[in-house]
Every structure is written in C-alpha cells, then in structure tokens.
Image: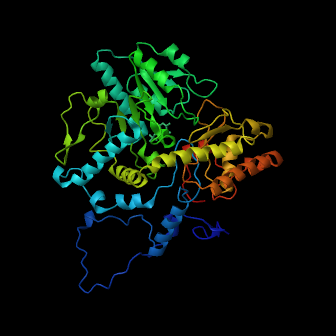
Amino acid sequence: MLKEFKAQGTTGLIMEEGLLWETGKKGKIGYSLPPLDVEQKDDLPKEIVRDELNLPNLSEVEVARHYTRLSSWNFGVDTGTYPLGSCTMKYNPKINEQIASMDEFSKVHPLFPEDMVQGPLKLMYNLEQLLKEITGLDGVTLQPAAGAHGEYTGIRIIYAYHKKNGKPKKKMLIPDTAHGTNPASSAICGYEPVKIKSNEKGILSVEEIDKYMDEDTAGIMVTNPNTLGLFEENIREIADIVHKRGGLVYCDGANLNAIMGIVDLKKAGIDVLHLNLHKTFSAPHGGGGPGSGPVCVRQDLVEFLPVPRILEKDGKYYLSYDHPNSIGRVHSFFGNFSVMVKAYCYILSMGNMLKRASELAVLNANYIKENLKDTLYLPYDRPCMHECVFTDKNLAQYKVTTLDLAKRLIDYGFHPPTIYFPLVVHGAIMIEPTETESKENLDRFIWAIKEIVKEAEKDPELLKNAPQNTKVKRLDEVLAARKPILKGY
Ligand SMILES: *Cc1c(COP(=O)(O)O)cnc(C)c1O
C-alpha cells in the first residue's frame, strides 16, 4: 500500500517521503494573488524566452510538510542520548543560540571598520582571556575553524619556532592512540609521523619516548586525556625529555571536557594546544557544521600566532598585523564567529561550574564503565576520564560484532557510540556520555546494552538484522557511501 500512495502514508509514525518531483503536479501553486486589473503584457522578445522549467509544482502545505518531515529524520542531542566517544555530544543550552543570533552579532560584517565592531572584538578578546585562564597557557588565536585546523596551525607554529632557531627538524612523535588528524596534520606541515606504542596500561611510557625522541624530531603530539579515555600520567616527564632534546609538546585538547579548570596544561609541560570549542564549549556540531579550534601557546611562541591578533589599548580593541614572525593567516577574517559567541556565553554562564561539569563527565563515564565491565570486555580496567572503551571480545562466541551491537542499540532508541576507534583495540566500542546525561538515562543505556548482550546469546540474528524499528534497515555501508540512494523509500 505504501508503494501505491508513494508520497503519503506512514509506518506507525515513521513518515514515508517521496521526492518533490513525485509529489508535485502541474497547476499546483503555493501562493495566490488577486486577479490582474491591468492589461497583461507578454512583451519579452521570443528568442530569449525559456521553455517551461522542470521544477515541481506544489502547494504551500506540501512544501511545509515535506521539509518538516525530513527534519524529523535527524537524530541529535535534543532528541536523545548521543554517547559518541571523542565527540563530546553534550546538550547545548538554547540561550547560547539565542544570543549568537542577536542582530548585534549575526549581522555584523567582517569588513566593518574597527570602531563599528568594538563589541564583537571585545567578545573575541575576552574569550581569548578566558581560554588562557582555563588552560593555563599565555596566548591564543581564535582563527582555526576546527580541531584539525587547529592542529595544522599549531604544527605550523612549531615549524616556525624550529626554523627561527636555525634547527629545522624532520619527524614528529605520535602515539598509536591518536586521532587520524594528528599524523595528517604533521605530514601536511612537512614532518614525518613516528608512531609510538602505548603501554599495557593504555598510556605512553617514558621509556618509549626516551627511545624515539632525538635531535631530528620536532616534538610530540599528545592527546590528553587520550582516546582510550585515560589520562597520560607521565606527561610531565615526557615533556621534560622532549624539551631537553630541543622539541616542543603539542597537546590535542579535543578531550578537554574531562579536565576543564582542573589541569593546568602549561604546568603539565604543554607548549601548544588546540581546543574544540564546538565540543567542549557546547556548540551544536556533527555533520560538518561550523566549528572553532582555537590554538593556545606558551609565552615564547606568542610571536608566531596567526595575524591579525586582537589587542586592546586604552579600552579600545583593534586588529594588529605587525608581527613579523607570525605564520600569517589561517582563515579569512576571524574564523567562525558564531561558535565563539556560543562558547563565550557557555563559559560565562558556567563560571566555576566548568570544573564541576568535567567532574560529572568523568563520573558518568566511570558509572557506565563499572556497570558494563561484566557485560562487555574492558581492555583497560582502571579509572577512566570522560569516556570508556570496551571491545566485542565477549561477543565473538555468538558470532556478533561491535557493528551488530551498535545497530541493535538504535532499536532501543539510542544513538550508537563511536565504534572501531581507537584502532589500538580490536572492535572498539567507545562511550562518552558527557555530564548532561541524567542517571536515569545512563541506567537505561546500561540496561539496553545488557539486554542486547542477552539477545546475542539467545538469538544473534536479532543483532545481525538490526536495526528493525527504523525507516531504513541495515545498510550496505560501502554501497551506501559510494552509490547513495537519496529517495525516502
Ligand atoms: C574531534 C577530534 C579531532 C578533530 O577535531 P575536528 O574539530 O573534528 O576537526 C582531533 N582529535 C581528537 C582526539 C578528536 O576527538
């Protein structure tokens, strides 16, 4: 029946959706105008008149319903629990959105003269000061548009530092738990990535760094806490070795949500750090939406920060270009301003509670870890930070995999966690609940995983054929990426 009445009809309340071309019909129209009360003129020269355009003709209500239904197919942090590891899918307070869309912010043009945009400049300047306060570092640029772009900017700064000192280097140490963007950013800046193995505790050992850090190495890119959700406890000693041998320490700060206001990164030996404002400081993200990846540096690297820098003199904010050692621009204008407004609102409204947010993010992850460690295999059984990583080792006996478990979770109404990352554990299931999930939701999630593991034992086909309660069932993921079928059937 659904097929006959293509564009209409439902499966429960899961709407079927046709293409507008199929719904449209000649003569339908989305507006009505009073009849012409003057003579109609068709006086365009015939040669330049186009044939009828092949566009769908629709009524207003059809258009409104089409787009509203499409919008309901999305799943987001406003819909339900979204425990995507390494992504910090926390709830984004709506007030941030409202303030970012105020005319005073959303309608300023980046080419306005400085004295007309003192407010936005002041906001960016203040945000830089707050990020210094939160991280312990000395200088900030807000230009980079995302984490990976921040990495690129930070490694360029490291490159410029070595070049200025007359000691260009060739290599960059990168732990095996690193996000794929780390080796990519090193390589694009001309450094050969050197993979460092983590130890049996899932963290870097001082001996490994001692073995690989040499005069030809520009430094190390550490993610702390790392992507196994574990704190790199040896960071201070590692930083000392790297510094002693002429290198710099880069920190991928994507996981800052675990340590906001708790760890002083300068004291930990970090020279350059990027943050993901869209993750930690609550801007909606995912699907490639606008991000912001500020880079924070130690005092002696401030001279290399991108221009323009935002400075203040006698209460006036201005753009400063006079920094001869700067790496130059990394983005047009100032980066993604609206994300900065959201982060600024978030930080100011949280105040000292930022620290509490991190504590709760860590507590929530440990709660999940402790409650599921007898159900799923936990490769590193020790206190975790903001996320915990399991594997599908226990499920192999039922011939089901991480992917099957993730797909079945959808039937239980949960967005799946990050899967098959980090690569150092086989069949990884990486869960990051964030601080904004209630205990009730965490309990429901834990219950769902336990139910699914029981199903795996009794009826593994349920997992193999999941999801079932969705509009689109199990996809051939390779085909879906290469030859997507975008019709709603
Ligand atoms: C998200 C993430 C990145 C990349 O950040 P983008 O903003 O997506 O470019 C880098 N490293 C880690 C550990 C991350 O989680």
Residue 86 lies left or right of residue 190; in this view the side is right
Image position, residue 487 (x, y; %): 55, 58
Type of colouring: rainbow
Q: Nearer the viewer, residue 215 or 467?
A: 215
Whether residue 189 is visible to the viewer of this picture, yes or no, is: yes
In the displayed image of the protein, which residue is found farthest to the front? Answer: 352
In the displayed image of the protein, which residue is found farthest to the right? Answer: 458
Q: Quadrant of the rendered structure where residue 391 is?
A: top right
Image position, residue 295 (x, y; %): 36, 36
Q: Nearer the viewer, residue 271 or 214?
A: 271
Residue 82 lies left or right of residue 380; in this view the side is left
Looking at the image, residue 57 lies above or below residue 135: below
Looking at the image, residue 299 lies above or below residue 89: above
- The C terminus - image quarter: bottom right
Whether residue 173 is visible to the viewer of this picture, yes or no, is: no
Q: How many marks?
A: 0
Residue 285 lies left or right of residue 296; in this view the side is right
Q: Residue at x 44, y 61 (%)?
A: 94
Q: Quadrant of the rendered structure where residue 393 is?
A: top right
Q: Residue at x 18, y 49 (%)?
A: 114
Image position, residue 131 (x, y; %): 37, 42
- The N terminus - image quarter: bottom right
Q: Nearer the viewer, residue 399 or 316?
A: 316
Image position, residue 287 (x, y; %): 48, 49
